[in-house]
Amino acid sequence: MRRVNAETQRVTRAESPGTTVGAGAGAGAGAGAGADAGAGAGDVLRRLAVPGGILTAVVGAFAYVGAVDPNQPGHYPVCPLLRFTGVYCPGCGGLRGAYALVHGDFAAALTDNALAVAGYLVFAVVWTVWVVRSVRGRPMRIDLGPVHLWSVGAFVLVFTVVRNLPSGGWLHP
């Protein structure tokens, strides 16, 4: 996009030497907006195929968890970390939380695994932004640097440690 704007500025300057940079940049932005406005419905549907497929898979998974109760033993595998060490992993209670969320019990979902519920909300926001950007013809980029990734890892580690302390019993699934 920068190259297009730079070329537009050069063309504008060549046509009238008194044109300022701001006017050239505005002309380039207007040309891009006209190109997006002319996009057909087929282009929009094509751009929404991947987000739609991801949403279909997630809705299918939540429908399955909503239909098959994880509180009943034997339907899902047991967490190996919990089974062999007695330590709750960050995902323990995630299926029960999803089941409670599907059935509209938000308090139980938070009690089962607050981190998973927060993850579901983050997914919903990121997916919505992805769809809006896809409709507008813009690529979806998530530029997480090392600081962000280490922060998320540290948060998950603190959550895991606190939920396994005697004082963190309110975070047990």
Image (tube, rainbow, N blue to C red):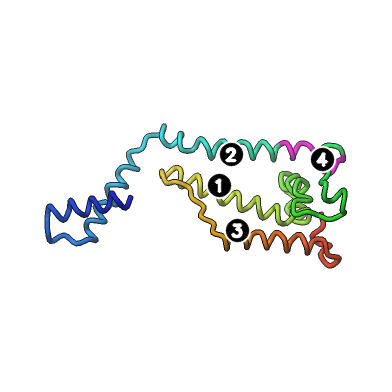
- Across and down, in percent, residue 127 comes to 55, 47
Residue lying at the far front in this picture: please name it. Answer: 146
Label 3 residue SS: helix
Q: Which residue is mark 1?
A: 127
Dot 1 falls on a residue whose secondary structure is helix
Q: Residues under labels 3 and 4: Cα distance?
A: 29 Å
Stretch in magenta: 64-73
Q: Earlier in the sequence, mark 4 or mark 1?
A: 4
Q: Which residue is mark 3?
A: 149
163 left or right, relative to 54? right
| Residue kind at label 4, given as amino acid type | Pro
Mark 3 and mark 2: Cα distance apart in space: 23 Å
Residues under labels 2 and 4: Cα distance?
24 Å
Q: Please state the horizontal and vertical placement of residue 63, each as a whole percent of the image.
A: 70, 37
Marks 3 and 2 close (CB-CB < 8 Å): no
Q: Nearer the viewer, residue 102 or 119?
A: 119
Q: Which residue is mark 2?
A: 54
Q: Earlier in the sequence, mark 1 or mark 3?
A: 1
Element type where label 2 sits in the image = helix
Circles 1 and 2 in contact, beta carbons < 8 Å: yes
Going from N to C along the chain, the mark reached first, 3 or 2, is 2
| 10 Å crowding of disc 3: few (<14), some (14-19), many (20+) | few
Task: Estimate the x, y position of residue 11 in percent, counting from the top left.
Answer: 18, 51
What residue appears at the point 82 percent right and 57 percent down from the top-left corner? 172
